[in-house]
Amino acid sequence: MKKFRPQPGFVVQAYRFALDANATQERALRSHCGAARAAYNWAVAWVEASWWQRRAEESYGIPEEALTEWRPCSLPALRKAFNAAKHTDPRFAAWWEDNSKEAYNTGLSNASAAFDSRCGRSFPYGSS
């Protein structure tokens, strides 16, 4: 890793902040962090389900044009799919309203970034 070196004549100043949350605030923070992680895990499973389905279909000799369609992994596509699923999926239905939509969006955004260039091109886990 490259070491940061400021330009000559510049001064670098850093700050460290710490949260001092009370019990109620800590519960809310934990809930929002959990919501982000749950959305991330949901998005990864949702996209990868089509990858594994396609791989199984290919193993049965199903032609390319008849394979299950790739599920999109862009942030807008994940948000649209998650917004449809959150009302009926038992993992979210009872508590998704307790958190900010941005908590879920953070998880979906991170999942989309994790997929990056692999999405919809080929099976990402070895040859298909």
Image (cartoon, helix red, strand yellow):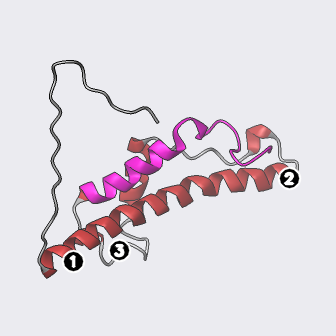
- Quadrant in the picture for the C terminus: top right
Range covered by the magenta-colored residues: 102-128
Residue 112: x and y in percent read 46, 45
Residue 98's disc is none
Side of 125 where 16 appears, left or right: left
Residue 59's disc is 2
Residue 93 lies in what quarter of the image?
bottom left
Q: Which residue is mark 1?
A: 27
> What kind of residue is marked 2?
Ser
- Residue sitting at the far right: 61
Residue 92: x and y in percent read 37, 72
Tell me the crowding category of disc 2: few under 14, some 14 to 19, or many 20 or more residues within 10 angstroms, Cα based.
Answer: few
Say how many tags the image has.
Answer: 3
Q: Which residue is mark 3?
A: 93
Q: Is residue 28 magenta?
A: no
Q: CA distance from mark 3 to mark 1?
A: 19 Å
Q: Nearer the viewer, mark 3 or mark 1?
A: 1
Tell me the crowding category of disc 3: few under 14, some 14 to 19, or many 20 or more residues within 10 angstroms, Cα based.
Answer: few
> What kind of residue is marked 1?
Arg
Instruction: Give me the residue at 75% from left, 38% from top.
Output: 65
Q: Nearer the viewer, mark 1 or mark 2?
A: 1
